[in-house]
Amino acid sequence: MMISRMALLVALGAMAPLKAQAQAQDSFDLGTLQLEAESDATLQQNGYVAEAGRQATKVDTPIADIPQAISIVTQDELEDQQPRTMLESLSYSAGTSTTNFAFDTRYDAVYLRGFPAFYTGLFRDGLRQVNGPSAWYRNDPYTYEAAAVLKGPASSLYGVSGPGGLVNIVSKRPKDEEFRELKFTTGTDDRAELAFDLSGPLDEDGRLLYRLTGVMRDADTPLDGYSDDKMLIAPALTYKLTDRTTITLLGEYSDSTVGGTASYYNPTRGTASNIYNGDPEYNDFEQEQFRIGYEVEHALTDAVTLRQNLRYSEIDSDLEYSGFYDAGGGTLARYWGHYLEDIQVLTVDTLAEARFSTANVDHTLVTGFDYTLSDYSAYSTLGYTSAAATDATDPPYAGGQDTAQMGVYLHDQMAFGGWTVFLSGRYDWVETDAYDAARTLTRTTDEAFSGRIGASYEIRDGLMVFANLSSSFSPNVGRVFDDVTTTVSRPAEPTKALQKEIGLKYQIPGTESLITATLFDIEQEDGIAFDTSTGVNKQRQLDLRSRGFEIEGQANLGNGLRLKAAYTYLDMEIEKRRHRHRGQHALGNARSHRVAVGLLRARNRPAQRLGLWRRSALCGRELGG
């Protein structure tokens, strides 16, 4: 049972004035009551169609004018789909892959255009979410009002990130009108959930606004001993200090428990079984996470605006996992592992936005700098006796990493005639201190320039053609092998990528819609991969090339129906280096097709998935085999 609006309270509150009015006249007009959950503070939404936002440019810009492919999951789409995880909320977006690890609710492990984006490509409210090996920040879909996917390299504004792009989560913010939502959910696997979302003004003049969002859930899953429990509270407060200055505080605390093991036993490489690796008595992954931050915006003049966003977050993870191994003679034996990890992250972004004109060109200029400091530590143990013995062992130190990153950027978007031109440039400095289990320090220092040039032109009413050239930069830690048959290694080079993209955007005249079709070519240099050809995991660096075609459309059809459809064709090629700077050759490739179509009814009714079809075919070969 689900109650998405407190209709009963609304009706009771309306009875008294209606009774008095009924005595004065024979008929009356009830009017239209429409409650929207989105705040439209940083992203303007209309049903399934995002109209304008600052997720791609850090300034408010019409989505159709941006010369880059962007997928945005709006608040209405989230309400209709009712996703349980961030991955489910992105499943209808072109270029995204959310099922690489099958059923695994432990991590938001998304791939964009064939590249992993879960370590360097997850952002929230424009600020980087640094994840450790296991201490990943979990984004509950009920706590955000949109998810924006920027396709392809985006380092020119956001710094360290991967070739496939990034996901920018938009947190729920206070609304200037009263909003109340209370939701009860039950389902299979003894699922019971209570969620609430409250917002509105706290004073008479509307300068102080609040929002309070919470989730309480107790649930099992189809996997034995794999739970899905959560307690979450997310407060937010906005204070309009003056007509030119606004301060918003955003916070969240969450305590969750899911399963520690989400895999099945594979007797040999390429052979699957129906034997679940998890031990029902030792299968908890407990995570406690906390974040607090602020957003300050001050209009210095009518043409110049200053902004600063800051967030501090902490994550503590306690992972109990298990699995089977071949003890010989066809006998399976079990092992148990205990892994502890904590991470603290401070990130701040300060910028100035200026709007001016030169000759017939309108400029929106953004310049700023950001800083991120992260620190994680890990403790690990593995046992072969029993779960109790493993649990009683105090896990020793397993490693850690401290990273400081600073970047300065400049972005100019110019509009003249039917043209919109983007020029972006950024320089990053990154220093990383990595510690192994013996606390031996390895220090790595990297710096790089990232850029983007893009242009779009309105051919006719609603039809835009665009193209862009953009790059990305991401440092790597540790040493790699050019020849895995030797013991000779070298420090890893940063991973860099360059994208070429062309496409069309079309808003059908007279409709609420947006269709985007793109062709892209991404060349990545010095990506990190594990080579197992010698029987020992050794890191090496490879070049990859991702090429493909995407088409995605959203439309509000009227009569309570909305449509979102996407198609992706992806062709990835892995290039193996014989010797560094001495040539390379193609090692293997993978091609995939993905189709997702959703036709859903309007909010306030159970979501109706009238059509969904996906097909994928992958081919390739592993390193060395």
Image (cartoon, rainbow, N blue to C red):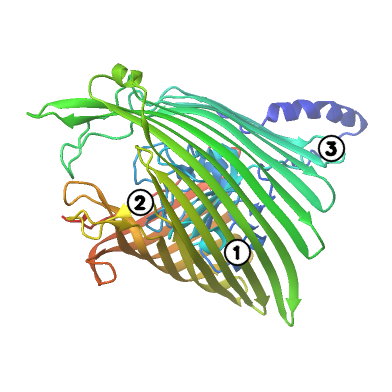
Check disc 1: other Cα within 10 Å, few if <14, some if 14-19, many if 20+: many
Looking at the picture, how far across and down is residue 497, in whole percent? 42, 65
Element class at badge 2: loop
**Image marks 1 and 2: residues in contact by CB distance under 8 Å:** no
Q: Is residue 6 left or right of residue 147?
A: right
The residue pinned by badge 1 equals: 409
- Kindly report the distance in space between the C-alpha atoms of the residues bearing marks 1 and 2: 28 Å
Front-most of residues 189 and 17: 189
The residue pinned by badge 3 equals: 28
| Mark earlier in primary sequence (1, 2) | 1
| Mark earlier in primary sequence (3, 1) | 3
Front-most of residues 449 and 19: 449
Relative to 250, say whether 123 is above or below: below
At label 1, the amino acid type is Tyr
Q: Quadrant of the N terminus?
A: top right
Q: Quadrant of residue 486?
A: bottom left
Residue ID at (20%, 39%): 272
The residue pinned by badge 2 equals: 478
At label 2, the amino acid type is Gly
